[in-house]
Structure formats: structure tokens, C-alpha cells
């Protein structure tokens, strides 16, 4: 196993996760370097969401080691809340807080976790909303926004505390086709700003454009990995080819 | 009266006609409602007044002079009910929220908390309120606990708080559990702790959903505050009516007390209805 460089943000080694008899991840190895964008692809139920939740410590792994910024975060003595505060996770179904305004959603963690004063949190929150093109919606309730707008707020909420790693779980799959573009454009911008990301997607075209590395998840392991040109353009493994032809059909 | 919108919109003739038709309909409905109510009340009233025992009932329950005489005492008693209700309500919210949070904790470490919470709810939901008032109202002062008052008022309120908290805790628990798990996950993913997620994400949503049910319990508490009268030494509206009645065995003071209780609870009930309706349109209920 190669020695992780100081530029390695996240490293998973032999990660296993089962729900009862259902072994979802049986030994996942994955490395994410600073500024890199890793895209996970794989069939429905292959464990892409589970992998992200394990990386975020929302699920406890059954075996293996996850190293985040040089620290073994699977050690039970590690404070999971503190680890999560250095990552940003965006959900497929946005999961915005309906009782808070858009700005309230974006600033909650700054105020309550990062100890930022309300005034400064509002200022940073507004700047972040401006960044995702929603400054004028800061006072609105999440329920009054379109799906694409809600997802952009969710990304702003995850991004505002400058996480070292962004985890994005199929952030466009709940959106109407005409709203997908606005979210993908935002992710492309983040990528060019050097934000380190791991994301799941079914949008192969987008994966090709934005990914530095594509990982095909199958049978609980990373079955094939490489540049988008290799994995999507010229897959070597039979399973990868089968998967890609299925979703293109 | 001319209407105009920012974009210079003026209602068309068709729209104006529709609106005037709706206004006419509203007036007509109100007139029909008023007429039918008068007829029903007239028939019921006629039946009661023409019944053979009406003469005696009228004398012992609806004596105008007695009503006026006893009114100040009963009203003063009602003020006591209001005070009991307000103080108990505050304590009930604190106790029941604590129990509800205890019952919704997870993990093996919190097992004793869940156990205590469950036992509390089981015991105090099972005991009739009147029994709790008898037991604590007379037994509590006898315990002579240092630091606790020995007054019947204190122990009567304590009975209400203990009994009601068991019910209200269940309302809060249902509210907490109705908040979708994805909301908790989203809170935790931001780095909020379990307690912070509860405080800033789950409880604000739970609270909104259960408020109409809680206000319903408050209306009920308002009436049940009268049960403390059985302790004899707290002069609330019912006890005051009892004292007035004992002077000449005319029961009119009870009717006065009943009337005053209704006057107190009706606005509360309307407020609850209004709030529930408002929630129905703008609540967080249908968002998942
Ligand atoms: N909390 C859980 N309890 C039990 N089983 C679970 C749980 N979460 C996920 N699973 C199971 O783990 C497997 C992988 O689920 P996961 O959500 O990670 O798949 P996925 O690759 O993200 O799929 P999709 O593309 O449909 O989102 C599924 O078989 C699922 O039923
Ligand atoms: Mg998934």
C-alpha cells in the first residue's frame, strides 16, 4: 500500500459495512487528494450512499480504516461531531430545515458549531447565498423555493463553514430535468475553485466533465477506477461495461 | 372603491360580478343560520320551561337574586383557578418536555432515562386525577419535607402538574417522533451534536405540530383546576360556590360558577381552533 501523501484528504482502506446479512461494502479502498473530484458510479443499491455516510461517520463501519486529514476517524475515541463539522454533506432530498429561513439554514452550523457571532454568520451566509445565486431569497422559507433552488441552498449550507471535503449524494436525482443544469453548473464552479469533492451521480456526461477520478462500485468493492476517459470511455472490466451499457440504453 | 395592482391590473366586469354574487351568498347563508338557530333554541327552551318540574328547578338553580349575591365571591374564586392554571401550565411544559426528551433518547447508556420516563407516564396516566389530588393534597403536607411548602394549594398544583405532564409528555413525544429522521441526519451532518440537533432542528418543528393539541390540554387544565376544591382549603370558584350554596341550599352559585368557567374556556377553545386552522395551511406537516 502506498504511503498517503500530505495532500491526501480522505483515505478508505478495507472499509466494510453490512446491514444484518446484507453486506453492502465488503472492502472499499479509495483515496481522495486535495482539490480532487472523485465520482462514484454504480448500480442502485451498490452502496454509494452508504459509502458517503460511512465517510461522514453517520454510519459506523464494521471494519477497515478511514483516514481524514491524517487522522484515523474510525477510532471510537474520535469525536464524530467535530469530524463532521470539517466535512460538508449534501443529501439527495435537500433536507433543509423547514422552520428556518434560507439564511437561517445556511448560518445554523456557523452559529452553533463554529461559534461565529450572529452578525458575522449572517454576513458569511449572505456572501455564500450570493455565490450560489440566491442572495435575494435569503428571507424565504425553503418550502417556497423550487427544487433546484433548494438544492443550491443545501450546497451553500454545507459549504459555508469551509469544509475540507464535500460529500454530495446524488444531488440532482430529485430534480426536474430543466433544474439539473443549474446545480451541475454550480458543482463545476466549485471544482474549478479547487473544492475537494466526492460525489455520486447517474449523470455520466457530467461525471466525464468534472471528475478527476471515477470509481465504479460493484459487489461491495471499487471494481474499477481511473480517469473518466478510462472508466467511462474505455472500461476494462466486464461488469463496468455491462453497467454503462445498461444506463445508456 | 377602486382596486389596482402594481401591474395596473383592474378586475374585469366578470370578476366584479362573481365577487358581488359571493357577497350576496354570504349574507344569505348568515341569515339562514340565524333563523334556524332561533327556531331550534325556541323549541328546546319551550320544552324545558313547560316541563312539570321547571318551577322548582327555576327556584333552586336560576334564582336571579342569589346569582347576583354570590357572583363576587365566585368570581374571586375563579381568579384563583386562573392563577393555578397559569402556574401549573408552565410547570407542565417543563416537566413533560423533559420526560418526552428522556423517552426519545437512543442508545444503551440512556436506557435508565427511557425506563424512568416510561414508568412515570404509565403510573400518572393510569391514576385518576382526583385520586392523585386526594393522595398528594392530604399526604404531601403530612410528609413534612423540608424546603417544600405544606399548603394544600402547593400540593394541589403538584397533583395537576404530575398528572397532566404524563399526557402532555406523550403529545410532545409524538411530535418529536413525527420529525423525519432525515432532519436529524442533516443536523448531525452539519456537525451539530445530538442535543443541539434536538434543540435547534427537532424541537422547533415538533413544537409547531403539537401546539393545537397542547392548547386543547390547556382548556382541559383550566376546568380541572377546579378539582382542587375537594381539598377544602383552596377557595377557587367551585369551593366559593359551595360555600355560598351552604348558606341556604340554593344551588344557583354552582350555575354561576359553571357559567364563568364556560366564559373562560370558550375564548381559549376558539383560539385553539383558529390556531389549528392556521397550522393546517402553513404548518410544517406536509413538507416531507
Ligand atoms: N439504514 C439501513 N438499514 C438497512 N439497510 C440499509 C440501510 N441503508 C442502506 N441499506 C441497504 O444498503 C444497500 C445499499 O444502499 P445505498 O443507499 O448505499 O445504495 P446506493 O448505491 O446509494 O443506491 P441508489 O443509487 O439507489 O441511491 C441497499 O441494499 C439498502 O437496502
Ligand atoms: Mg443512494
Image: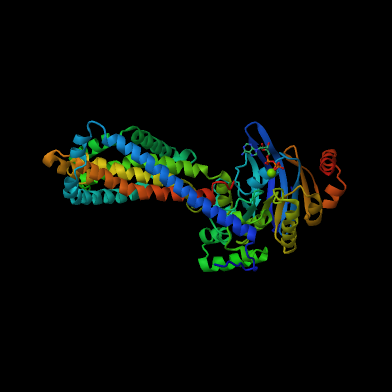
Q: Is residue B160 left or right of residue A48?
A: left
In the displayed structure, B20 sits above or below A136; it is above
Q: Quadrant of residue A178?
A: bottom right
Asked if residue B197 shows in the view, the reply is: no
In the displayed structure, A132 sits above or below B120; it is below
| Percent position of residue B45, x then y | 31, 38
| Percent position of residue B133, x then y | 25, 38
Q: Is residue B223 left or right of residue A136?
A: left
Nearest the eye: A213 or B132: B132
Q: Specify the color scheme.
A: rainbow
Q: How many marks?
A: 0
As drawn, the residue found furthest toward the left would be B247
| Percent position of residue A68, x then y | 64, 53
| Percent position of residue A189, x then y | 73, 62
Residue name at image x 66 percent, y 57 percent: A149
In the displayed structure, A226 sits above or below A63; it is below
Nearest the eye: B124 or A30: B124
Nearest the eye: B59 or A248: B59
Nearest the eye: B33 or A243: B33
Q: Quadrant of the N terminus of chain B?
A: bottom right
Q: Quadrant of ligand 2?
A: top right
Asked if residue B228 shows in the view, the reply is: yes
Amino acid at each position: 500500500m502506498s504511503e498517503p501523501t500530505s495532500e491526501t484528504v480522505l483515505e478508505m482502506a478495507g472499509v466494510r459495512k453490512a446491514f444484518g446479512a446484507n453486506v453492502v461494502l465488503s472492502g472499499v479502498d479509495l483515496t481522495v487528494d486535495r482539490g480532487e473530484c472523485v465520482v462514484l458510479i454504480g448500480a442502485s443499491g451498490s452502496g454509494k450512499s452508504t459509502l458517503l455516510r460511512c465517510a461522514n461517520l453517520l454510519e459506523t463501519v464494521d471494519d477497515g480504516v478511514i483516514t481524514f486529514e491524517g487522522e484515523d476517524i474510525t477510532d471510537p475515541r474520535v469525536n464524530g461531531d467535530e469530524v463532521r463539522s470539517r466535512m460538508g454533506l449534501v443529501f439527495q432530498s435537500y433536507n433543509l430545515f423547514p422552520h428556518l429561513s434560507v439564511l437561517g439554514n445556511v448560518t445554523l452550523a456557523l452559529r452553533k458549531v463554529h461559534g461565529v457571532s450572529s452578525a458575522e454568520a449572517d454576513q458569511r451566509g449572505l456572501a455564500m447565498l450570493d455565490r450560489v445565486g440566491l442572495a435575494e431569497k435569503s428571507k424565504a422559507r425553503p418550502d417556497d423555493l423550487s427544487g433546484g433552488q433548494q438544492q443550491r441552498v443545501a450546497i451553500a449550507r454545507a459549504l459555508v463553514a469551509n469544509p475540507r471535503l464535500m460529500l454530495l449524494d446524488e444531488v440532482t436525482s430529485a430534480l426536474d430535468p430543466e433544474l439539473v443544469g443549474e446545480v451541475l453548473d454550480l458543482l463545476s464552479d466549485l471544482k474549478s475553485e479547487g473544492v475537494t469533492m466526492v460525489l455520486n451521480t447517474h449523470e455520466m456526461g457530467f461525471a466525464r466533465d468534472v471528475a478527476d477520478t471515477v470509481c465504479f462500485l460493484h459487489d461491495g468493492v471499487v471494481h474499477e477506477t481511473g480517469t473518466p476517459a478510462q472508466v467511462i470511455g474505455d472500461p476494462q472490466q466486464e461488469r463496468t461495461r455491462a453497467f454503462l451499457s445498461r444506463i445508456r440504453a | 372603491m377602486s382596486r389596482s395592482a402594481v401591474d395596473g391590473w383592474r378586475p374585469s366586469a366578470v370578476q366584479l360580478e362573481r365577487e358581488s354574487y359571493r357577497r350576496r351568498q354570504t349574507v344569505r347563508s348568515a341569515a339562514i343560520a340565524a333563523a334556524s338557530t332561533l327556531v331550534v333554541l325556541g323549541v328546546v327552551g319551550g320544552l324545558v320551561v313547560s316541563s312539570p318540574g321547571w318551577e322548582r328547578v327555576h327556584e333552586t338553580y336560576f334564582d336571579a337574586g342569589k346569582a347576583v349575591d354570590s357572583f363576587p365571591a365566585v368570581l374571586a374564586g375563579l381568579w384563583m383557578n386562573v392563577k393555578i392554571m397559569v402556574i401549573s401550565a408552565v410547570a407542565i411544559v417543563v416537566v413533560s418536555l423533559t420526560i418526552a426528551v428522556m423517552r426519545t433518547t437512543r442508545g444503551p447508556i440512556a436506557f435508565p432515562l427511557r425506563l424512568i420516563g416510561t414508568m412515570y407516564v404509565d403510573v400518572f396516566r393510569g391514576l385518576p386525577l382526583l385520586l392523585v389530588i386526594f393522595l398528594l393534597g392530604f399526604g404531601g403536607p403530612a410528609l413534612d419535607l423540608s424546603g417544600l411548602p405544606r399548603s394544600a394549594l402547593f400540593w394541589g398544583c403538584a397533583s395537576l402538574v404530575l398528572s397532566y405532564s404524563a399526557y402532555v409528555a406523550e403529545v410532545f413525544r409524538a411530535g418529536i417522533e413525527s420529525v423525519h429522521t432525515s432532519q436529524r441526519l442533516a443536523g448531525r451532518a452539519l456537525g451539530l451534536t445530538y442535543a443541539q440537533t434536538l434543540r435547534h432542528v427537532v424541537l422547533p418543528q415538533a413544537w409547531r405540530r403539537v401546539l393545537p393539541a397542547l392548547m386543547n390540554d390547556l382548556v382541559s387544565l383550566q376546568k380541572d383546576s377546579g378539582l382542587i376544591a375537594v381539598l377544602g382549603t383552596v377557595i377557587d370558584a367551585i369551593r366559593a360556590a359551595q360555600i355560598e350554596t351552604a348558606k341556604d341550599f340554593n344551588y344557583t352559585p354552582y350555575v354561576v360558577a359553571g357559567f364563568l368557567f364556560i366564559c373562560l374556556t370558550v375564548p381559549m377553545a376558539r383560539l385553539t381552533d383558529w390556531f389549528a386552522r392556521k397550522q393546517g395551511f402553513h404548518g410544517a406537516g406536509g413538507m416531507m
